[in-house]
Image (spheres, rainbow, N blue to C red):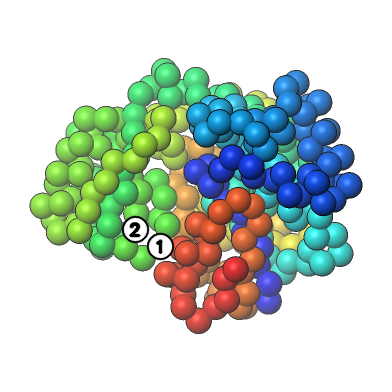
């Protein structure tokens, strides 16, 4: 069975999507439609901008989303997934590819999500850190003993769990987890504490936009970040989209569940190859490209 997966923020690069724009009339049409929806020429920044341009939150998230979704649309009849999933932001790409959301609604939600997250980062400063080669349960137990906000944020693959929270709590957690045997505890160059309670203002703001947006039955099951389970009910898909900003990305568990449900081939649609690498670390028996 075929699973299509969609990357999140961090996969962007200058020039992304330019080949799609130049080689496909459909892609060109969708990119131009996106420029109109957003009210600025995001294609100029994606194709010919500076790396700093792509780091702006209002640019980064829509850019990755557009590259991912348009890559799926250009496949046309060849896009026949048995299941889909996306990592963090990528979940919205997956929802559009699976026909839960329209292209326009998906882009509007991603843009609203980016702006809401940026505001939350300014209101509630925080950061994230990657913990390498330490048992997940030991990490979870250690975090419970720390004062302040610090939680598991991204279960990326065995031996790689990203934590998120207030700056002081993350610093304390890094020290404690290194003492507990972590090979590395590496603070990440991110703008805030994504997928933690510090994103609550963004979750509340995005909830209003999501509740006002129609969600449709998908063409295949969507494995969602918050519980790593397959969903086809539009109301469940909507509720999980809302919970995602403050909940953990259970990527490793999602991939394991997809494999348990029959996935043997994973195709990453979007910029970069991050998810391919993670999937190969989760299970070496499946094909990921």
Report helix, strand or loop for mark 1. Answer: strand
Q: Is residue 26 left or right of residue 13?
A: right
At a point 59% along the width and 36% down the height, the residue shown is: 61
Q: Quadrant of the C terminus?
A: bottom right
Q: Position of residue 67 (x, y in %)?
A: 68, 46
Q: Quadrant of the N terminus?
A: bottom right
At a point 87% along the width and 40% down the height, the residue shown is: 29
As drawn, 206 above or below 83? above
Say whether residue 248 is visible.
yes
Report helix, strand or loop for mark 2. Answer: strand
Residue receiving disc 1: 157
At a point 44% along the width and 40% down the height, the residue shown is: 195
As drawn, 169 above or below 275? above
Q: Position of residue 129 (x, y in %)?
A: 31, 43
Query: What is the C-alpha distance between the residues marked 1 and 2?
Result: 5 Å
Residue receiving disc 2: 160
As drawn, 157 above or below 125? below
Q: Position of residue 76 (x, y in %)?
A: 85, 60
């Amino acid at each position: 069975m075929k699973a299509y997966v969609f990357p999140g923020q961090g996969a962007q690069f200058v020039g992304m999507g330019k080949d799609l724009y130049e080689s496909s009339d459909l892609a060109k049409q969708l990119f131009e439609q996106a420029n109109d929806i957003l009210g600025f020429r995001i294609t100029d920044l994606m194709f010919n901008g500076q790396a700093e341009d792509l780091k702006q939150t209002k640019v980064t998230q829509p850019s990755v989303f557009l590259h991912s979704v348009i890559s799926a649309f250009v496949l046309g009849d060849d896009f026949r997934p048995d299941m889909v999933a996306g990592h963090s932001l990528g979940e919205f790409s997956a929802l559009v590819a699976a026909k839960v959301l329209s292209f326009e609604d998906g882009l509007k939600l991603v843009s609203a999500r980016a702006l809401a997250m940026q505001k939350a980062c300014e209101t509630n400063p925080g950061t994230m850190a990657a913990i390498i080669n330490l048992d997940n349960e030991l990490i979870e137990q250690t975090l419970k003993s720390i004062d302040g906000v610090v939680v598991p944020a991204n279960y990326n693959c065995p031996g790689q769990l990203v934590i998120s929270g207030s700056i002081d709590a993350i610093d304390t957690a890094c020290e404690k987890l290194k003492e507990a045997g972590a090979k590395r505890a590496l603070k990440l160059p991110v703008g805030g504490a994504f997928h933690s309670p510090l994103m609550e203002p963004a979750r509340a703001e995005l909830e209003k936009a999501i509740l006002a947006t129609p969600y449709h039955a998908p063409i295949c099951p969507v494995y969602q970040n918050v519980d790593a389970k397959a969903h086809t009910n539009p109301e469940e898909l909507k509720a999980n989209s809302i919970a995602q900003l403050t909940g953990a990305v259970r990527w490793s568990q999602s991939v394991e569940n997809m494999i348990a449900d029959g996935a043997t081939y994973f195709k990453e649609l979007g910029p970069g190859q991050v998810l391919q690498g993670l999937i190969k670390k989760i299970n070496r028996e499946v094909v990921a490209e």
